Image (cartoon, grey):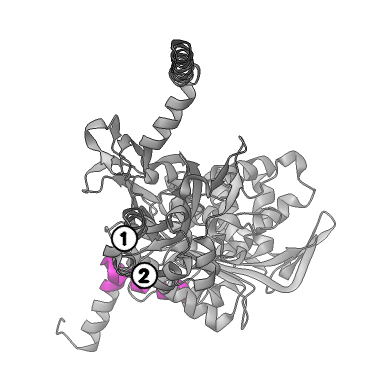
Amino acid sequence: MNNKTQIYRARLLLAFLGLAFAGLGYRLVDLQVLRHDELSAKAEQNTQHEYWQAPRRGDILDVNGNILATSVPVKTICADPSLIGTFQPLVAHAIAPLLQLNEIDLAQKLTPRLARNAKGEIVTNNFHYVRLAKNISDDTWRQITAAMTNLPFGVDEKKLPRAQREFVRNLREHAIFSEPDQMRVYPNGSLASQVVGFPATEETKTSGYIVSQIVGRDGAELAMQKQLSGVAGWKVTETDSAKHELVALRDEDVHPRDGLNVVLTIDSVVQHIVETALADALQKHTPRSITGIVMRPKTGEILAMASLPNYDPNQPNTITPETRNRVLTDVMEPGSTFKIVVVSGALNNSVVSLNTPVFCENGHFAFAGRVLHDHESLGNETVKSVITKSSNIGAAKIGIQLGADNLHDYAWNYGFGQRSGIPLPGEARGFLYPVKDWSKVSIAQIPMGHGVAVTRLQMLYAMAAIANHGCLMRPMIVKQLQERDGSIVQRYAPERVRQVIGEKADLDIIEALKTVPTKEGTAPDAALKNYVVAGKTGTAQKAENGSYAPGKYFSSFIGFFPADNPELCISVVMDEPKEGYYGGKVCGPVFRDIAERCASYLNIPPDPKLMTNATSALVVENGSRKL
């Protein structure tokens, strides 16, 4: 070999090496400079992960600390189809029974699906993530883990090549994984369901993973969403090739702040008493719906609020428009219960006294081109007996004496035509038209409870104002907020809205209302054995398509006891009851049932007057011996 050949080969080798180093240099520049940002982002995406840490949703408790709604820890089961290869049938056969899923459908979920991304690259199931099942218990997850560990491959895995052994290990340990989650549970089922409400799950995608969050959709779950939900935490950390966290490289770790517990004014026992009594009445009178409310008139605290039919928030399929909270959402003409507004206003303005005579026109009264009717022929009555016998004509004449402006103002001051401000969703305003929009007959019809629309809650807390010395109190449904350890974060105090009538007028209207649950009144079946009751009946014909529907009524009784020192105010309303429709006849017994059981449970002292009468009777019956 001559020198020229050696030189030629040397130059060729040198050129090759030069080109190789030039290519390597260009590649380094491309990786380190030209594509630095892109590749850094990819590297971080492969090794750096951001985890959203959901807070625990707070509980909803009754006034005595009994749990009405709580969150329990569960698992969401997920899979990485890229780690399963062709073993989808084997994995599906092992875990489908545990997840209560169809084996064939599960195998399809576990099959990687090829697609092209925005750059035209072929990828499998974006981010290697597919969700299989939610709300799985820890016990079931342990069974799934054991099933994956014991997958029968039918070969001696120790004899497999290293790459295949690594594949099998990843399949067993990482192909099926779980994410922490929580499930909302209602231990008492349908008890107070419309007050407590129900949740839904909202899902968002973060870093390729689906993140679930419980959000309220009705009741306190919705109204107190911010307080219940807490504040999410997050963790930014790096992982190795096996997806194990490198704790030393953790950048951020912000722990979530759990939601607060919401303590309601609802008493579970009182709520159960009300719902049981309503259920019995529902079976007896088969109304379209029936509602009941129990309130402390001195504070506005609501101890029970029920509407049947209701739903079980544990079973979403039971939630329908018919199971809405009609106490707040529905409006109706109140009928004769509205007479407390016109009579108390007239007494307060000294337009009448309880003994002022009122001629009730023997049951027919022509006014402004209309004929007003009473349920019976009544002649000369007093203002007091207008309440006792529930005379429409008597109330109309008192309203005419009071005047349109005054009547409207008293109705407004009692809370009609406006929301009460109770912290629950869906509350209607009702309808109280301004005087300028009244017809000529409105001044006579509104005192009878026609031409005005109210919610059940509005009518109750107007009556509660009379029970509370004429002072209107804001309805309370939330008592306090507290941490999980029971420490109080915020306590809500009773809120006085306004003084509607004075003390003298209030005492007079109560005296009139005491006569309603008597033999002379319209609700003798509402009377209690050991307590003096004050209350008012209502029987309002339903309006449909611009006219009153024959045979369809709203029936109601609203009362409080003990009348001279009221502890509870109770409302019962039926929509289209059968087997009778007068408020005193169908709702009075339900009121009595609720009141008697609540009085026993709450240890309300018997009325001293009735106890004195009972003692005197015993003395007479037993001679001089005092029992």
Image quarter hosting the N terminus: top left
Answer whether residue 495 is visible to the viewer in this image: yes
Instruction: Give the mark toward the camera: 2 or 1.
Output: 2
Residue 57 x, y percent position in the rendering: 36, 49
Q: Residue at x 51, y 78 (%)?
A: 281
Residue 74 x, y percent position in the rendering: 35, 59
The answer to whether 607 appears left or right of 45 in the picture is left
**In the image, residue 316 above or below residue 468:** below
Near-viewer residue (74 or 30)? 30
Q: Which residues are magenta?
A: 590-612
Residue bearing the label numbered 1: 67
Near-viewer residue (332 or 183)? 183
Secondary structure that dominates the magenta span? helix
Near-viewer residue (22 or 389)? 22
The mark tally for this picture is 2
Q: Residue furthest front?
A: 1
Three-letter residue code for mark 1: Ile
Q: Residue at x 82, y 53 (%)?
A: 368
Residue bearing the label numbered 2: 153
The answer to whether 229 appears left or right of 557 in the picture is left
Near-viewer residue (502 or 427)? 427
Name which quarter of the figure residue 412 lies in: top right
Three-letter residue code for mark 2: Phe
As for residue 592 lying within the magenta part, the answer is yes
Q: Residue at x 31, y 35 (%)?
A: 238
Residue 306 x, y percent position in the rendering: 47, 65
Task: Name the secondary structure under disc 2.
Answer: loop
Upstream in the sequence, badge 2 or badge 1? Answer: 1
**In the image, residue 76 above or below residue 522:** above
As for residue 255 lying within the magenta part, the answer is no
Task: Name the secondary structure under disc 1.
Answer: strand
